[in-house]
Amino acid sequence: MSVNDRPTGQPPSATYDSAFLRACRREPVPHTPVWFMRQAGRSLPEYRKVREGVPMLESCMRPELVTEITLQPVRRHGVDAAIYFSDIVVPLKAIGIDLDIKPGVGPVVEQPVRTRADLARLRDLTPEDVSYVTEAIGLLTRELGATPLIGFAGAPFTLASYLVEGGPSRTYENAKAMMYGDPELWADLLDRLAEITSVFLQVQIEAGASAVQLFDSWAGALAPADYRRSVLPASAKVFDAVAGYGVPRIHFGVGTGELLGLMGEAGADVVGVDWRVRLDDAVRRVGPGKALQGNLDPTVLFAGPDAVRAKAREVLDSAAGLEGHVFNLGHGVMPSTDPDALTRLVEYVHEQTA
Ligand code: CP3
């Protein structure tokens, strides 16, 4: 089944005709749909309040808390889609990897994966390992009604970057050393991560997610030839594993201007673009048949209402000739963003495109 087929043999879901899913399928829309990566989180006072005293990873395992946090930006900003509140390292934690998310730092892995023996610690993920995800999505889809829920996972390269480095990195020297120096181990690691990621996305779709996004946030560190040889096959395997569900698949990375064509080839229905490439240029790089998502620079939100409107207008102008545009930032909402600036931006995009 492709994303353009209405599901048969079952009633169409309440979200099927939403502006967001229509844009992903490149169908006409009542207005350009808007959502923001990291729309749930520290920019919202109501988020900081419910997270008080609860460590990040623990909050991801409490279905009622996940439901509340996921709904907060939908209530406040009127965005066209919710994104499931979790983190890319949750499936790794679920298979027993000793890791934590350190405030202000990010994911930290106790014993980095550097050898073939380390690889054996990455066992299969089963739906039972993440039963709290199934439960939370059940609660969420009932609350969301006609608003679609986006499920997500980290792409094999971005997950590998944390696993091999042991934490956040600017250079990815250990991960790239494995990629260049032991291509067989690297390929096996990425393939293992592709299997884990595929199951994690399947669980979310089967529980009721209407779309999925693969975050390959750090893929922009790679040259196109290395991406093609050493990363694309694993991401393509993930997109393939969820193709049969007919839900839109979004592929996102930062600094990936030179990789957009290859990211299109990996198989997604929608390709995310950051602010470095105009959308009318990005569409030529990505190739035909795909919708685009993006691409306002998240720092524009610090520049005051007039500047935000002017820069948002530029994004809409660069998207004017596209079939299928989902308005988003080029990367996640920064924690110190004024939430009112986000609410005004949603209103502006809706009003300009209605
Ligand atoms: O609203 C949403 O978008 C859903 C929530 C979401 C989180 N992480 C929650 C979170 C999503 C989609 C992610 C994905 C994620 N996690 C990515 C890919 C997206 C991107 O930004 O490129 C990456 C690279 C990670 C790894 C990670 N987790 C980082 C770099 C951090 C930040 C560390 C910090 O404190 O600055 C995290 C922690 C994290 N994930 C937070 C949230 C809300 C902050 C922790 C907190 O609120 O206490």
Image (tube, rainbow, N blue to C red):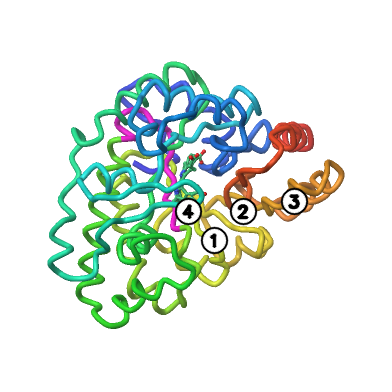
Which label belongs to residue 172?
none
- What residue sits 83% from the left and 44% below the top? 304
Pick the residue in front: 302 or 254.
302
The residue tagged 4 is: 105
What type is the residue that disc 2 sits on? Gly
The answer to whether the residue labelled 1 contacts the one labelled 3, judged by CB atoms less than 8 Å apart, is: no
The quadrant of the image that shows the N terminus is top left
Density class for disc 2 (Cα within 10 Å; few <14, some 14-19, many ≥20) is: many
Picture coordinates of residue 94, whole percent (x, y):
24, 42
Sequence-wise, the earlier of marks 2 and 1 is 1
The answer to whether the residue labelled 2 contacts the one labelled 1, judged by CB atoms less than 8 Å apart, is: yes
What type is the residue that disc 3 sits on? Val
Density class for disc 4 (Cα within 10 Å; few <14, some 14-19, many ≥20) is: few
Q: Is mark 1 within 8 Å of ligand 1?
A: yes
**Residue found at the very far right of the displayed protein:** 306
Q: CA distance from mark 3 to mark 4?
A: 23 Å
Determine whether, in the image, residue 61 is placed left or right of residue 254.
left
Question: Does 196 sit above or below residue 130?
Answer: below
Q: CA distance from mark 3 to mark 2?
A: 11 Å
User: In this rendering, which labeled residue sits more in front, label 2 or label 4?
Assistant: 4
Which label belongs to residue 254?
1
- What residue sits 44% from the left and 24% below the top? 67
Please report the bounds of the magenta region as a residue range.
204-216
Q: CA distance from mark 1 to mark 4?
A: 18 Å
